[in-house]
Image (tube, rainbow, N blue to C red):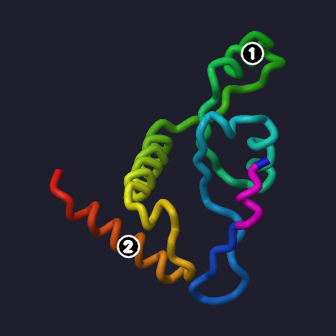
Amino acid sequence: MIPVLEEIRVPRQTGGRPRTRPDHVGGDKAYSSRRNRRHLRRRQIKHTIPEPRDQRANRRRRGSQGGRPTGFDKTIYRRRNEVERTINRLKNFRAVATRFDKRAYVFHGTVTVAAIRLWLRPE
């Protein structure tokens, strides 16, 4: 099961109870277990998680008992990869990677400065 989902709390701009269910979850092949997919389906959360080659082969081998292939949207998965690569580029900044700052608002400022430096960096 994906334990991080239980900790999500997104405050609403208009007030009220915070949101606890994301619109969409993207993950890599490590999160492709039946248990994770079942948990996401029960909470009615759309997901984009690729199916590993061995799981795909086992499902096909079982024939009609193996179930339907999982839905997978390549364009959404590409966006997930872009975000992951951007986070890795941010971690090249030592203060972001080691999180020297004690307070969240100071760390947020550090990440913002690192993002601006990446944005302004000539390529």
Instruction: Give, as a single range, the part of the protein colored magenta.
Output: 2-7
Residue under numbered circle 2: 112
Q: Which residue lies furthest to the bottom in this view?
A: 15
Which image quadrant is residue 110 in?
bottom left
Residue 55 percent location from the top left of the image: 71, 22
For residue 75, which numbered disc appears in the image? none
Q: Main secondary structure of the magenta part?
A: helix
Q: Which residue lies furthest to the top in this view?
A: 61
Looking at the image, which is closer to me, 56 or 116?
A: 116
57 to 38, vertically: above or below: above
Q: Which residue is drawn at 63% across and 74% down?
A: 10
Q: Which residue is drawn at 52% across and 68% down?
A: 99
Tag 1–tag 2 contact (CB < 8 Å): no
Looking at the image, which is closer to me, 93 or 45?
A: 93
Residue 2 percent location from the top left of the image: 74, 50
For residue 58, which numbered disc appears in the image? 1
Taking the image as shown, residue 94 lies to the left or right of residue 26, namely left
Looking at the image, which is closer to me, 75 or 36?
A: 36
Which type of secondary structure does the marked residue at label 1 adopt?
A: helix
* Front tag of 1 and 2: 2
Q: Residue furthest left?
A: 122
Name the residue type under label 2.
Answer: Thr
Q: Which residue is drawn at 47% across and 76% down?
A: 108
Which image quadrant is residue 5 in?
bottom right
Name the residue type under label 1.
Answer: Asn
Q: Which of marks 1 and 2 is nearer the N terminus?
A: 1
